[in-house]
Amino acid sequence: MQILVAIGALALVFGVLSFIVFFMQKYKGGRIANTPFHKTGDVASKGDEVAGDKGALSTEGKVVFSEDDLLEAPVQGGKCLYYKLTVTASWKSGDNSKSVVVHEEKKGVVFGLDDGSGVCQIDPQKGGDFDPLDKFNKTKSRGLISTIKGGGLEFGENGFMVHPGGRVKGHIVPDSAKYEVKEEALRPQDNFYVNGKYADGMIGSPSWASLYVSGKSREETLSSTMATANKAKMVGMIGSGGGVVMLIIGLIFGGGGKKDTDTKATTDSKPAMEAKADEKAPAKAAPATKSAPATKSAPAKSAPAKTAPAAKSAPAEKPAAGGAKRPGAGGGAGGGGGKRGGKAKRR
């Protein structure tokens, strides 16, 4: 039953996480549906007028950019409109695990969108929720030989180098530390759907949410988001419901099994206690049983020993009873015998 409880707990956690995804996707879908959507020309010429509350505004169109303005991804290489790079060092210090961000940077370039009505500007420099993203994630550490020889760790096709060791943000990073390099790059696409805040003549990152950039159209993005939300909701309901049921069953039967075990242990212990009592009883009674025959047999053996000489000595003394020397009753009898003898002689 402990396995059932563990599975139920995992299912419940998975269900809760699915509900979190559901609420996030639900919020995202509501944001897409409720944010004012206008043509790129109207955004460029009437931005403040067509924007919603807090400057919320969305549009879509063909991506417009200059090759000379594009960035190069430091790790993966290639041209991009935006990238974010994070380098993290981690190591063991005794029983403790430590980590520190060695390097972090993000850069973006302003690009345009045009649906044929005019070009509006998009600013991704503060980052946001971008789809699709070209992602890189890899961890490396020095081996023994490379630690002795020195040198750096190389990541990605662009030959990004990390030099282990040194002091970073108050931490002394050992040469044997592991380094994790993450990079996210937004590559140019044919078309983008953008949802953000209109300010300073362009759409950028809102203060209450992130800038959303998608390679799909508005309708495709909304449909995909709601489909993901519905799936997450279903998984959350199944996971949470099933997890609760398994937990209850496991706890009920697990507790009952424990009681049955305790009862069985108590029941099994009674015969053991009785057996111990039976073992102790003969041990105490044994001396009494042995001593009783000894006490009875002692008189039985000694009685014949005392009476046997008495029975044999009585006949042995009768011939001497006729003599005058026997005192008491025996002497009287002997006297009578003597008189009878005297009478016989006279005859």
Image (cartoon, rainbow, N blue to C red):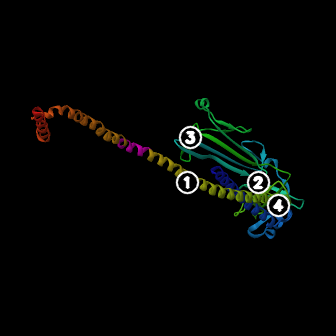
User: Magenta stretch?
Assistant: 279-288
Assess whether mark 1 and mark 4 are in contact (beta carbons under 8 angstroms). no
Q: Secondary structure at mark 1?
A: helix
Residue at which label 2 appears: 130
Assess whether mark 4 and mark 3 are in contact (beta carbons under 8 angstroms). no
Residue 15 falls in image quadrant: bottom right
Residue at which label 3 appears: 166
Residue at which label 1 appears: 263
Label annotation for residue 222: 4
Asked whether the viewer can see residue 143, the reply is: yes
Left or right: residue 333 versus residue 132 is left
Please count the marks in the image.
4
Which is in the foreground here, disc 3 or disc 4? 4
Q: Secondary structure at mark 3?
A: strand
Query: Which three-letter amino acid code belongs to the residue tagged 3?
Result: Gly
Query: Which three-letter amino acid code belongs to the residue tagged 4?
Result: Leu
In front of the other: 118 or 293:
293
Real-space Cα distance between discs 4 and 1?
61 Å
Real-space Cα distance between discs 2 and 4?
15 Å
**Residue 252 vertical placement versus 146 (above, below):** below
Left or right: residue 128 versus residue 142 is right
Sequence-earlier tag: 1 or 3: 3
The residue under the point 74% across, 46% down is 135
Sequence-earlier tag: 4 or 1: 4
Which is in the foreground here, disc 4 or disc 1? 1
Farthest residue, direction right: 116
Assess whether mark 2 and mark 1 are in contact (beta carbons under 8 angstroms). no
User: Magenta stretch: residue 259 in it?
Assistant: no
Q: Position of residue 342 (x, y in %)?
A: 10, 34
In front of the other: 38 or 231:
231
Real-space Cα distance between discs 1 and 3?
64 Å
